[in-house]
Image (cartoon, rainbow, N blue to C red):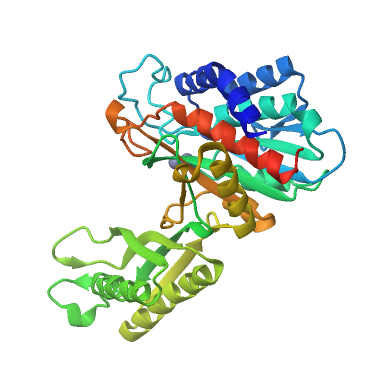
Amino acid sequence: MKDNILSMAKEMEAQLVQDRRYFHQHPELSFEEYGTARYICKRLDSLGIPYQEGIAGTGILAEVKGKAEGKCLLFRADMDALPVEEKNDVSYCSKNAGVMHACGHDAHTAVLLNTCELLYRLRDSFSGTIKFAFQPGEETDGGAKPMIDAGILENPKVDACIALHVDSDIPAGCIRIRKGPLYASPDNFYITVKGKGGHAAEPQHAIDPILISAEIISQLQAITKQEKNAVVTVATIHGGDATNVIPDMVSLSGTARSLDCDTRAFLEENIEGVVRSVCDAFGADYEYEFEKLFPPLVNDETVANLIAESAIQCFGEEACIKGGVPTMAGEDFAYFSLERPSALFKLGCRNEEKNIIAPIHNSLFDIDESALLCGLSVFTSCALRFLQAK
Ligand SMILES: [Zn+2]
Ligand SMILES: [Zn+2]
């Protein structure tokens, strides 16, 4: 089966690169992936693969059924691009000014589309169902949750979910898979310190929100000393207009990130605890809002093992890096991991000889396109292992 996967994937490489370059040249911002969705639907139509479109806006769910009933596996790719002006000098450079696939979602979408095609061709070799979720809006509010709310994990019921993300720290041809926490919950907090303004020469008659804010900021740092798997960063501070006036209020905002749900709840509570105790001590009032964005993404051990075994089967031990450290960035595939055993692996796309080294979200980001074949092979192998193809 391994040789079969690799040779069939290799035959599809030109198409894979063509798809990726089309997406790269026509990047669209979150929830505006209309052209991308049209292209995907056209390809699915030409293959005769059934799908549902218009889920959570531009989302698409394609489905490939095997020869008999069985388990159900879902693959997910995000489709959106970023408001970045591309600075690469390549033939497939972005044609949309100010928009760029700087996070590699063009590669994710191309790999998913071609995995769908390859598994459709192999449908007589397995039992069960494979779903392919083309998801909008990962970079902003997240299309994962609305797609799940629309029912994509049911009928038939999905047993496990798999996704990938390109990674410029890993050489093309390799993947990295880690069990447990992988991405953080990238939540925000907003604080308004309400003091009492007055003449800057007479601070004894005022309740100085600037002084109070300074105390809050320094005490917030103590939280992350206690909680190692957390980051609390005050990123904005606004208050005051003149050197001789103590203002009435100061507003602060920042990000609070954690790698598990318990720490997340701890942060929400303890940031407010710091604000409350400092404001109480100074006789000030406050407002506090904790804005929950994506949950932390925790990779399931069994699914992570399936990915590792599949990668090793295709490309050998040296192509599969296990472990590594989690990132404090967010990833809305986390919503899948809350619902079903799920795992996301990193797909290496670095090539130092070709000077493909820029990090994601950078205007010079690019991938070594040999990574695409690796993604296609690993996805396909995962599906066949999971559905125990003979
Ligand atoms: Zn991104
Ligand atoms: Zn991304």
Nearer-the-camera pick, 69 or 203: 69
* 248 lies above or below 149: below
Estimate the x, y position of residue 64 in percent, counting from the top left: 76, 31
Q: Residue at x 74, y 28 (%)?
A: 122
Q: Is residue 189 above or below residue 160?
A: below
Taking the spot 37% from the left edge, 60% from the top edge, the residue there is: 253
Q: Quadrant of residue 1?
A: top right
The answer to whether residue 151 of the structure is visible from this angle is no
The percent position of residue 380, horizontal first and vertical second, equals: 64, 35
Q: Residue furthest right?
A: 68
Rendering coords of residue 217 (x, y %): 29, 70
| Total numbered labels placed on residues in the image | 0
Q: Residue at x 27, y 77 (%)?
A: 207
Q: Decide which of 242, 144 is in the foreground and name it.
A: 144
Is residue 287 rendered to the left or right of residue 197? Answer: right
36 shown above or below 265: above
Q: x, y percentage for residue 236?
A: 31, 57
Quadrant where the image shows the C terminus:
top right
The outermost residue toward the bottom is 281
Q: Is residue 307 visible?
A: yes
Look at 53% across and 71% down and name the residue there.
Answer: 265
